[in-house]
Image (spheres, grey):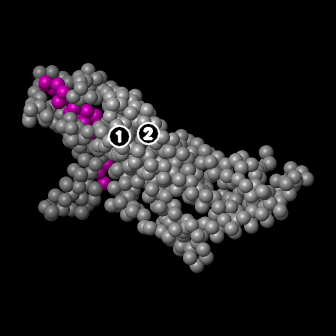
């Protein structure tokens, strides 16, 4: 389907049957053991690096497969020897299974050995590994022989999918794909950002008018509305039943989110929440910029590393999302008059852009936090070696902790904004909901609500955390 980029991952993880899955997992286990046995300072395939490469090789092999198919389509179209039906069938090429990544690791293992015997029942049929350019490039024909052998005994296997894995394996071993550049926290957001830029044209976000004056107008209107609501509503109802009925009458339930019941809100309260949340997002944007600038100075000796580039990519997604949210407010909440509101098509398009950018940020930041958590020990040892430079150890460690906190708070506020705009549970969210719903989105939405509710209007005009009008316990 169109724009379903996640199929590059699900296609590699899906298998036809348990036997298919079992053979691939056994192959992955044996290849991982071989890489660990041949580990040295040059190759550097540790367990964490092996895992990160496995995740990155899934989209890399998919990209190489798409490039091979595109070249074949262009060649057949120019030659004029293929019908439209044959070209259409070539465009609909699909693969299932993890074999492409396994063939990539097979190439790496074969190039780490002096010779390779690719056919199991022909132990004497071995091929020598050759070195070129002072050992920087190695080549062994064994994986290519195994590719044709597998195609001969199993005609249904994907020849182009396995060939894409072989090409990725050579590029990996020749150091064309260094881990600092192609690890998931960099590769995934980079590819997604290029897709939004070149294919869907959702970025860059067009500039929008400032909302400061309209925010002041909304605040002055809401102060009067909130005062009237406080005077109209009794502080101590005569009975729980009458209190529940009165609350239902004053604040009808808002069920914009599919399958979820939102909190009862009025139009003025919703406008205040939207604008207030935007202020929090602006604060987080400042934190993102500050964290990025600290990274430019703190990680100066690692400016080509994943620490800095992952932060830059996450910040780019977040800033684009904040710009889209400001544009969305100008079209809806912060419109000074009904005539200045955007058309339904403009509002729908901006909501789609906002939801897509927020999903991109959540994916990027989750990958960043996971990578930092797994590699924190390695970065600690690196920074200890940099302790005598302009960046002491405590400052480098503090920079990592600060950026983790900034991203965690930003994720919670983004989940809150997506829930308010019905983007978390939107029908077009695809597999995003299934992966992040119970792990990130629901928990982030709860924390985001707590952050926003910590500033609640009370009768005296002040703002005190956890005070103000609440709900009767047990009411629906």
Q: Is residue 256 magenta?
A: no
Residue at (23% x, 55% y) in the render: 70
Boundaries of the magenta span = 92-119
Q: Residues within 10 Å of mark 2 (few under 14, many from 20)?
A: some
- Give the image quarter of residue 41: top left
Is residue 369 found left or right of 235 in the rendered image? left
Residue at (48% x, 49% y) in the render: 287
Residue at (61% x, 76% y) in the render: 337
Residue 231 versus residue 136 in the image, above or below: below
Q: In this view of the protein, can residue 16 be seen by the observer? A: no
Is residue 27 found left or right of 289 in the rendered image? left
Q: In this view of the protein, can residue 38 be seen by the observer? A: yes
Image location of residue 383, percent across then percent down: 36, 31
Q: Tell me which label, 2 or 1, sits earlier in the chain.
A: 1
- Give the image quarter of residue 447: top right
Q: Are marks 2 and 1 in contact (CB under 8 Å)?
A: yes
Residue 399's tag is: 2
Q: Secondary structure at mark 1?
A: loop
* Residue that numbered label 1 is attached to: 299
């Amino acid at each position: 389907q169109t724009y379903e980029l996640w199929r590059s991952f699900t296609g590699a993880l899906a298998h036809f049957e348990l036997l298919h899955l079992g053979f691939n997992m056994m192959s992955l286990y044996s290849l991982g053991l071989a890489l660990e046995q041949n580990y040295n300072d040059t190759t550097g395939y540790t367990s964490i690096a092996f895992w990160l490469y496995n995740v990155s090789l899934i989209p890399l092999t998919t990209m190489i497969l798409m490039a091979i198919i595109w070249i074949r389509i262009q060649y057949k179209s120019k030659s004029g020897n293929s019908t439209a039906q044959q070209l259409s069938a070539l465009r609909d090429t699909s693969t299932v299974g993890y074999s492409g990544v396994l063939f990539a690791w097979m190439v790496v293992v074969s190039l780490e050995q002096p010779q390779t015997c690719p056919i199991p029942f022909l132990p004497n049929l071995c091929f020598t590994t050759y070195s070129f350019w002072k050992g920087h490039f190695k080549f062994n024909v064994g994986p290519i022989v195994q590719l044709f052998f597998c195609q001969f005994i199993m005609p249904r296997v994907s020849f182009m999918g396995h060939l894409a894995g072989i090409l990725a394996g050579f590029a990996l071993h020749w150091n064309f794909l260094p881990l600092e550049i192609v690890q998931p926290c960099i590769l995934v957001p980079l590819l997604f950002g290029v897709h939004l830029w070149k294919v869907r044209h959702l970025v860059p976000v067009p500039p929008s008018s400032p909302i400061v004056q309209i925010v002041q107008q909304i605040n002055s209107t809401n102060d009067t509305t909130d005062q009237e609501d406080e005077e109209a509503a009794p502080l101590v109802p005569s009975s729980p039943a009458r209190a529940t009925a009165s609350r239902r009458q004053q604040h009808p339930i808002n069920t914009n989110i599919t399958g979820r019941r939102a909190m009862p809100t009025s139009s003025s309260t919703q406008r205040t929440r939207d604008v207030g949340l935007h202020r929090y997002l602006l604060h987080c944007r400042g934190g993102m910029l500050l964290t990025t600038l600290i990274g430019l100075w703190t990680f100066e000796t690692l400016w080509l590393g994943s620490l800095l580039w992952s932060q830059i990519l996450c910040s780019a997604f977040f800033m684009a999302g904040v710009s889209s949210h400001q544009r969305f407010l100008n079209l809806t909440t912060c419109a000074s008059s009904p005539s200045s509101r955007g058309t339904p098509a403009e509002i729908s398009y901006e909501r789609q852009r906002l939801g897509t950018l927020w999903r991109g940020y959540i994916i990027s930041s989750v990958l960043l936090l996971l990578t930092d958590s797994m590699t924190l020990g390695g970065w600690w040892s690196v920074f200890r070696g940099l302790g005598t430079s302009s960046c002491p150890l405590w400052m480098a460690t503090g920079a990592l902790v600060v950026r983790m906190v900034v991203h965690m708070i930003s994720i919670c506020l983004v989940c809150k904004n997506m829930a308010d705009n019905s983007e978390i549970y939107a029908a077009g969210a695809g597999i995003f909901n299934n992966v992040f719903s119970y792990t990130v989105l629901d928990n982030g939405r709860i924390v985001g609500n707590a952050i926003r509710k910590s500033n609640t209007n009370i009768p005296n005009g002040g703002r005190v955390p956890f005070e103000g009008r609440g709900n009767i316990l047990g009411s629906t």
